């Protein structure tokens, strides 16, 4: 595997910063509260949906730089497995194992459903082209 071009690294870094800032801003505007972590849930499900939708966009398929800026960059910064894990652990520490399980399994299953729906908007050859450009990493 050849090392990525500096412009691709810059695109991922800039995109990741944008996604992380957006995620933080949404988290501040709509905090999760003490129950079900709805904000993080919505961020992760919307990110999974958007990532699966990227191959349907011709501009993304034509530009490796745009693919990596939006895929692992913006959407990688937008979604957050670490917050999901921490919130699940916190719910367990609070003595709420059923809610923790519902949250963790619900996030996984809803994100998979979102990916399935979004994947229907792009053809398999578009998805393969996107993967070849490494926009799905």
Image (cartoon, helix red, strand yellow):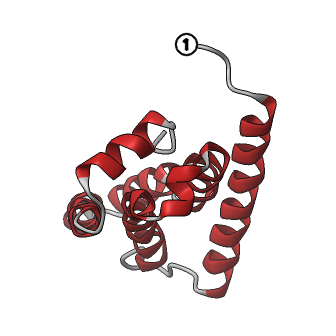
Q: Residue at x 79, y 41 (%)?
A: 10
Q: In which quadrant will I find the N terminus? A: top right
Q: Residue at x 40, y 42 (%)?
A: 129
Q: Which residue: 44% across, 34% down? A: 132
Residue extending furthest bottom? Answer: 29
Decide which of 82, 52 is in the foreground and name it. 52
Residue closer to the observer: 96 or 130:
130
Query: Residue 22, image x and y in percent?
Result: 68, 71
Residue 67, image x, y percentages: 57, 50
State the residue in front, 79 or 101.
Answer: 79
Left or right: residue 83 versus residue 35 is: right
Coordinates of residue 4 in the picture (x, y in percent): 68, 25
The answer to whether 54 is drawn above or below residue 127 in the figure is below
Q: Is residue 116 left or right of residue 4?
A: left
Number of residue marks: 1
| Placement of 9 over or under 40, stated as above or below | above
Q: Is residue 101 left or right of residue 64?
A: left
Q: Residues within 10 Å of mark 1 (few under 14, many from 20)?
A: few
| Residue 91 position by quadrant | bottom left
Q: Position of residue 62 (x, y in %)?
A: 56, 51
The vertical placement of 62 against 39, above or below, is above
Residue 90: which quarter of the image? bottom left
Decide: is 33 above or below 118: below
Q: Residue furthest top?
A: 1
Left or right? Give the position of 46 relative to 2. left
Residue position for label 1: 1
Q: Residue at x 58, y 86 (%)?
A: 30
Secondary structure at numbered mark 1: loop
């Amino acid at each position: 595997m050849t090392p990525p071009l500096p412009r691709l690294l810059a695109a991922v870094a800039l995109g990741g910063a944008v996604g992380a800032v957006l995620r933080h801003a949404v988290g501040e505007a709509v905090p999760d509260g003490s129950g079900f972590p709805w904000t993080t849930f919505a961020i992760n499900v919307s990110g999974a949906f958007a990532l699966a939708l990227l191959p349907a966009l011709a501009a993304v398929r034509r530009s490796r730089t745009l693919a990596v800026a939006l895929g692992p960059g913006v959407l990688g910064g937008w979604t957050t497995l670490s917050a999901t894990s921490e919130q699940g652990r916190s719910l367990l520490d609070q003595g709420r194992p059923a809610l923790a399980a519902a949250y963790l399994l619900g996030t996984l299953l809803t994100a998979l459903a979102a990916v399935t729906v979004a994947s229907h908007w792009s053809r398999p050859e578009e998805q393969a082209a996107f993967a070849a450009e490494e926009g799905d990493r």
